[in-house]
Amino acid sequence: MSTTADLVVALKAELKASGLTYAALAERLGMAESSIKRMFSANGDLPLSRIDAICHALGLDFADLARKVADSQPLLQQLTLAQERAVVADRQLLMVAICVMSQMSLTEILASYALTEADGVRCLAALDRLGIIDLRPGNRYHLKVAKGFRWLPQGPVMAFFRQEVLQDYFAGGFDGESEMLTVVHGEIGRGLAAAFRDRLTRICQDFSNQHLADQKLPASQRQPFTLVIGMRSWLMPALKQMQRTGEGV
């Protein structure tokens, strides 16, 4: 939830953007300028009634102000264990969570999957309570996770993917149009490994950005793809079994 301090910061930004000085605001509210300055100070008291009056003076709806505050909050890089457990415990909720990570609208979700509108709204409300989205009027939402968001590596959601998704995914031939599967093994400097990881992360972000950009295309011109990128310090068992023990030859 946003604090009063966050609202004050947002109001200050709106005052600056509108070019309205403290003196001009004080005149509109019928207050002394010193009182306005005191309200906006670090230790000031800004009750809800004053916030509403300032919004009115700025021609700003309080809901719009609250939305701007919500949009300015730090985005989640990961969920907590409790949040992931709650998502995985409800299969419909998990499916809707995966969809909102791709920023699909409720209309798109209902058109693509066998959910009733009531089920969809229930899931969006649950994701709002969990802090994953900010649910807005008309069943629109603001996603509260960062572009580089990752599920917990050993958490409940990744356990679901390992148990129910990976085998089906890798069972494919990867020989369709625009498909590929490549396994590359090698040894590189420790410092370069992090650089490669960052480059792979940017590829994931590019893919996500392209998905969002292409939502304007008709459904007939879009095709679902799933990009899986992984890099791990690991040696396949077949090679590990053949490793020398370190004894002399």
Image (spheres, rainbow, N blue to C red):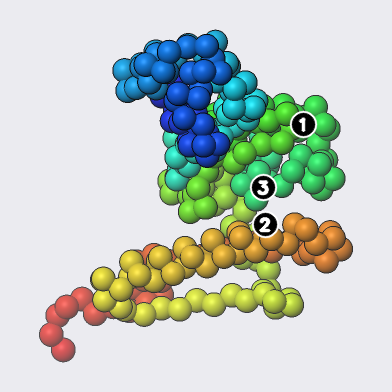
x%, y% of residue 188?
30, 78
> Could one spot residue 141 in this view of the protein?
yes
Give, as a three-letter code, the residue at label 1: Gly
| Quarter assignment of residue 44 | top left
Q: Secondary structure at mark 1?
A: helix
Give, as a three-letter code, the residue at label 2: Leu
Residue at the bottom extreme of this rendering = 249
Residue plotted at (71% across, 36% down): 140
| Quarter assignment of residue 39 | top left
Residue plotted at (43% across, 13% down): 32
* Quadrant placement of the C terminus: bottom left
**Among the two numbered marks 2 and 1 on one chain, the one whose residue lies closer to the N terminus:** 1
**Among the two numbered marks 3 and 2 on one chain, the one whose residue lies closer to the N terminus:** 3
> Could one spot residue 86 in this view of the protein?
no
Check the image and report above or below for 193 versus 35. below
Residue located beneath label 2 in the image: 212
x%, y% of residue 216?
78, 58
**Among the two numbered marks 1 and 3 on one chain, the one whose residue lies closer to the N terminus:** 3
Q: Residues within 10 Å of mark 2 (few under 14, many from 20)?
A: few
Residue located beneath label 3 in the image: 103
Residue located beneath label 1 in the image: 138
